[in-house]
Amino acid sequence: MFTETKASVDNPYFKVHALRRSGHDTVVSRLEAAAPGVIDLCSGLGGLSLAAKQLGFQVVAGVDVNPSALKTFAKNFPDAKALEGSVRSQKIISECAKLLQPLKTAEQPTVVLSGPPCQGFSAAGSRDPADPRNQVLVAVARAVSKLQPDCALIENVSMLLADKHGDRIRRFEQTIQQGGFHVTHIVLDASEFGVPQKRKRAFFLATRQQVDKQAVMNRLESFKTNSINARQALDGLAKAKVRPDDYNDETDYEVVHNHFAMQHSKRVMKKIAAIEPGTGPMSYRRLHPTRLSNTLFSGHRAPPAHFREPRSITVREAARLQGFPDDFRIYGSFANQMEQVTNAVPPPLAVAVLRVLTEMTRLAIPHHV
């Protein structure tokens, strides 16, 4: 059930989510037996899984190598199995197969979701074709072939479709095709689906029957909506307090979760204060209140700065810019929380794509967000 914090009630963007998710738990419990079962490979904190859950799917398990991200996944999807390990591990994929078997025996549909690490492909990452993380993409294809779901959805950065990664994509698609699937790839911008951020992503739809790419794009048009700007997205949040020295991710600080400011020095705060909103270097680029956020990146660069206050945005503010509701709590070290959020798939975008995928494959959707 959606928990209405003061911030979510005051913010019209999150009020819509609250109204649409009213009665969510009741609906899921009534339809769980018929709901598609989901395995999330390279789950991270669970952006794709959240989209599936909002559609009423049964999240069965999440797999990731990052223990902090997996802790976040486990806390937000308590009924799912959190498996720490690589999708390249036969043991891990065999465990996933065992978890899916009862659903298949009951003739429930199954879906594999995956957002493999993108740092080797991303403009903000290494962009090294030899980056070992790039190999995970083909490992995901092998896992899909082994698990044999009714369909699969794989997400990554749009740069993955650049010519220099052509060999990798061909291996990826050939591996899935050998498992009996057809692959359709599309590129979408999250800002066209209600996410207050410019964020282009590539999606690969693996289906048993060939689907028409233009038909997919035409159907997605009906889910596009005007996005909100940075100020609207962050509206209703109280002024962020500075993170305490003894910060603990399990402690209830009686504020909106994950809404603590970084411990900036006076020099850094002065530097940020001098930057005009909408401008600045990659580190501390300031948000503009009436525009979309630029793409949020993870890694060594600092997150964007607040448009009004001389500080970097909080993890909660980053989560809002990604389209996560306030009741989705992020765990792990303070620094790792931001990485988890910026690596995630924006749930509103994932909801739209997953809805179209399930329509194209004639899977029943228990209910709509």
Image (tube, rainbow, N blue to C red):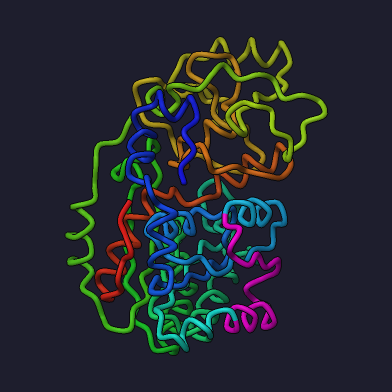
Q: Position of residue 219 (x, y in %)?
A: 19, 60
In this image, 208 relative to 50: left or right?
left
Check the image and report above or below for 180 versus 141: below
Left or right: residue 292 versus residue 119 is left
Q: Residue at x 46, y 72 (%)?
A: 37
- Relative horizontal placement of residue 69, taking residue 189 as reference (left or right): right
- From the viewer's perspective, is residue 49 above or below residue 192? below
Tell me how many marks there are. Answer: 0
Q: Is residue 139 above or below residue 330?
A: below
Q: Which residues are magenta?
A: 77-98
Res 368 → quadrant: bottom left
Closer to the camera, 364 or 128?
A: 364
Depicted 153 relative to depicted 276: above or below: below
Where residue 69 appears, x then y in whole percent?
Answer: 65, 53
Residue 84 occupies quadrant: bottom right
- Which of 148 and 203 lies nearest the eye of the viewer? 148
Q: Is residue 178 visible?
A: yes
Quarter of the rendering containing residue 328:
top right
Q: Is residue 158 visible?
A: no
Residue at image point 31% right, 59% down: 367
Give residue 171's position: percent from left, percent from top: 48, 79
Residue pictured at 32% horizontal, 44% vertical:
20
Residue 81 belongs to magenta span: yes
